[in-house]
Image (cartoon, rainbow, N blue to C red):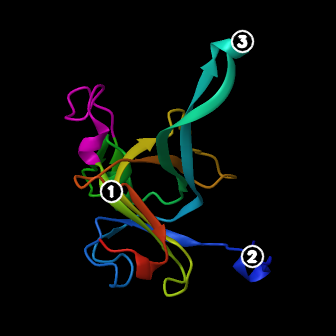
């Protein structure tokens, strides 16, 4: 067991980008910056299935690891065209060129559309990228806006949209890397 050390406690502020081409380049690494986000959480939801024994009255005697469902949760804080295009399947450029979230039954993305079709490689870059703070590289991040999204339109609350990315395998079977930059390759 290691000796406790407060220097090992981490606060990792950072930013998201998608479709990076080279992680050695400065942020957004040859990709597209996603607007400012806050409340970023990387969740590893492990799935377990109980093994029960009839001879013990159906009591659980073991468990089987059945994989995991990794997710990234964040709140998008900017009404930014690049971020909206990367996160919302109903995004369209407005007629004036500004961002527009539009639901249209004649749209190419409607109920029943596969969100994996708009999945992207997403990277979380710490504000201190040369340190040992962990980066997160999601190999195929499927955007899933919070199902009960509420976008505040009040003067006393900042604009924010809760977003979720489901991390799924890319064509090589890789899902994510959570490590120092030096240990991650595209």
State whether residue 94 is above or below residue 106.
Answer: below
Q: Examine the rendered structure and indicate whether residue 39 appears above or below residue 109.
A: below
| Range of magenta residues | 102-118
Label 2: which secondary element: loop
Q: Which residue is mark 1?
A: 174
Would residue 124 appear left or right of 42 to someone viewing this image? left
Q: Could you classify mark 1 by the number of other residues whose Cα lies within 10 Å: few (under 14), some (14-19), or many (20 or more)?
A: few
What residue does disc 3 label?
57
Separation of disc 1 and disc 2 at Cα?
31 Å
User: Callout 3: helix, strand or loop?
Assistant: loop
Q: Is 110 contained in the magenta span?
A: yes
Q: Quadrant of the N terminus?
A: bottom right
| Residue shown at 30% from the left, 49% from the top | 119
Q: Residue at x 19, y 35 (%)?
A: 108
Q: Which residue is mark 2?
A: 2
- Tell me residue 151's x, y (percent): 55, 43
Tell me the mark number nearer the camera, choosing from 1 and 3: 3
Quadrant holding the C terminus: bottom left
Of 7 and 109, the residue lying toward us: 7
Q: Position of residue 85 (x, y in %)?
A: 32, 53
Quarter of the rendering containing residue 46: top right
Report which quarter residue 183 is drawn in. Answer: bottom left
Magenta segment's dominant SS is loop
Query: How far apart, in angstroms, are the residues tagged by discs 2 and 3?
Result: 41 Å
Mark toward the start of the polypeptide (1 vs 2): 2
Q: Residue at x 59, y 45 (%)?
A: 152
């Amino acid at each position: 067991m290691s000796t406790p050390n407060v220097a090992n406690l981490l606060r990792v502020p950072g930013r998201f980008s998608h479709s990076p081409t080279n992680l050695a380049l400065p942020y957004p690494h040859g990709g597209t910056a996603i607007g400012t986000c806050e409340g970023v959480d990387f969740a590893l939801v492990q799935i377990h299935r109980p093994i029960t024994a009839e001879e013990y009255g159906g009591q659980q005697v073991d468990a089987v690891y059945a994989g995991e469902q990794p997710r990234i949760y964040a709140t998008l804080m900017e009404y930014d065209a690049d971020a909206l295009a990367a996160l919302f399947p109903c995004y369209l450029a407005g007629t004036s060129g500004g961002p527009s979230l539009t639901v249209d039954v004649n749209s190419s993305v409607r109920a029943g559309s596969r969100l994996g079709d708009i999945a992207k490689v997403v990277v979380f870059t710490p504000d201190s990228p040369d340190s040992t703070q962990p980066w997160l590289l999601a190999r195929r991040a499927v955007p899933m806006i919070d199902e009960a999204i509420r976008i505040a339109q009040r003067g006393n609350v900042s604009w924010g949209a809760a977003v979720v990315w489901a991390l799924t395998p890319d064509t090589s079977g890789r899902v994510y890397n959570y490590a120092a930059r030096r240990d991650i390759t595209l």
